């Protein structure tokens, strides 16, 4: 009788533990769901636009598309919008110039330096959250950075006076057979400073420079404790519903559309093409 009762008690304990575990899993899943909802951004509703204006803009856009883009063998996508209203949308050509994989609304293509606006957005988001201040100097993040008084704001506004890695890395002896990373850019700025020309004191003048945004990507990684691609996906792309947008890196080379020159020749990757923050976001 005692053995039977003991078995019953053990069975009931097991049931209680199982129910408790299931309940905890549901609570955990609900917490994750709430966190995901909290991350989402409310996209503003389109502004009112009259049908006559919409038709006029559509006709003008279509005329441009038919008379300028189509005769030039345009290969890509175009959207014209006003106040959140899509006026004209058209896709033409293919991902590969042999005709495979037609371009459509879900085809991610390299948006090149428009990436810089997303990097800036991420930095300002971190400032809003109190995780950095754009007046911070880079030594706050990289203690060995030996360019005095360069601030995050200087990077954002292209007034850092830093040289462009697109040019100085190779001049300073980088082997073009090896890929450059963001960390390489930082290390060479620090370690090769004596060999680098065209360094200007910060905040003297505007100079458009990819180095600024390669460093901003490193700052995002340092502050968030996440990789730049992972941070952008979690806090920018996913909350905005950008399901076909990603940061290109070595691990996802096969999913991106290739680039071609004006003669239709594929542009191969080179040693500069794997630095992100200044470029390498692919989107629709």
Image (spheres, helix red, strand yellow):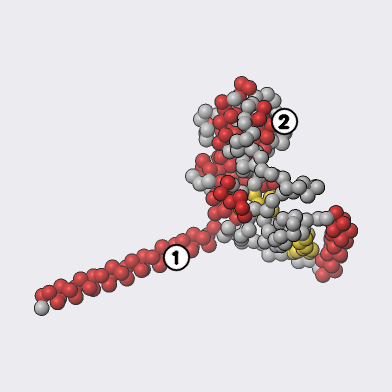
Extreme-left residue of the structure: 1
Give the residue displayed 62% in from the left and 31% down from the top: 175
Q: Secondary structure at mark 2?
A: loop
Give the residue displayed 66% in from the left and 30% down from the top: 170
Give the residue displayed 58% in from the left and 38% down from the top: 181
Total numbered badges shown on the rendered structure: 2
Q: Position of residue 151 (x, y in %)?
A: 60, 34
Q: Quadrant of residue 63?
A: bottom right
Extreme-bottom residue of the structure: 1
Mark closest to the chain's N terminus, 2 or 1: 1
Extreme-top residue of the structure: 194
Question: Taking 216 as reference, is 205 left or right?
Answer: right
Give the residue displayed 17% in from the left and 74% down from the top: 7
Dot 2: few (<14), some (14–19), or many (≥20) neighbours within 10 Å?
few
Residue 226 visible somewhere in the drawing: yes
Screen quadrant of the N terminus: bottom left
Label at residue 205:
2
Determine whether 87 is above or below 127 in the image.
Answer: below
Q: Gap between marks 2 and 1, in whole Å?
A: 51 Å
Q: Position of residue 46 (x, y in %)?
A: 71, 64
Q: Quadrant of residue 138?
A: top right
- For this rendering, which residue is in front, 240 or 7? 7
Screen quadrant of the C terminus: bottom right
Label at residue 253:
none
Determine whether 183 is above or below 231 in the image.
Answer: above
Q: Position of residue 4 (x, y in %)?
A: 14, 77
Question: Taking 95 as reference, is 137 left or right?
Answer: left
Question: Taking 217 as reference, is 208 left or right?
Answer: right
Question: Taking 193 as reference, is 78 left or right?
Answer: right
Q: Secondary structure at mark 1?
A: helix
Residue occupied by mark 1: 30
């Amino acid at each position: 009788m005692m053995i039977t009762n003991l078995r019953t008690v053990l069975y009931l304990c097991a049931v209680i533990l199982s129910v408790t575990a299931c309940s905890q899993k549901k609570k955990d899943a609900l917490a994750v769901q709430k966190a995901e909802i909290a991350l989402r951004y409310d996209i503003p509703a389109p502004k009112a636009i009259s049908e006559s204006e919409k038709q006029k803009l559509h006709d003008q856009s279509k005329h441009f598309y038919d008379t300028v883009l189509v005769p030039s063998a345009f290969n890509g996508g175009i959207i014209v919008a006003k106040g959140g209203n899509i006026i004209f949308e058209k896709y033409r050509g293919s991902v590969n110039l042999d005709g495979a994989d037609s371009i459509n609304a879900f085809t991610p293509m390299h948006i090149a330096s428009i990436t810089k606006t997303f990097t800036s957005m991420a930095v300002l988001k971190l400032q809003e959250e109190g995780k950095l201040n754009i007046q911070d100097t880079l030594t706050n993040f990289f203690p060995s950075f030996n360019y005095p008084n360069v601030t995050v704001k200087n990077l954002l506004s292209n007034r850092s006076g830093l040289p462009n890695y697109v040019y100085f890395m190779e001049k300073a002896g980088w082997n073009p057979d090896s890929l450059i990373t963001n960390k390489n850019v930082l290390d060479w700025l620090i370690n090769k400073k004596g060999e680098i020309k065209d360094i200007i004191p910060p905040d003297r003048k505007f100079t458009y420079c990819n180095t600024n945004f390669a460093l901003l990507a490193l700052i995002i990684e340092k502050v968030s404790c996440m990789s730049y691609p992972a941070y952008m996906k979690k806090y920018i792309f996913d909350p905005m519903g950008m399901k076909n947008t990603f940061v290109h890196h070595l691990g996802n080379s096969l999913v991106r559309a290739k680039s071609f020159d004006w003669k239709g020749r594929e542009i191969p990757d080179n040693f500069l093409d794997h630095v992100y923050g200044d470029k390498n976001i692919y989107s629709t």
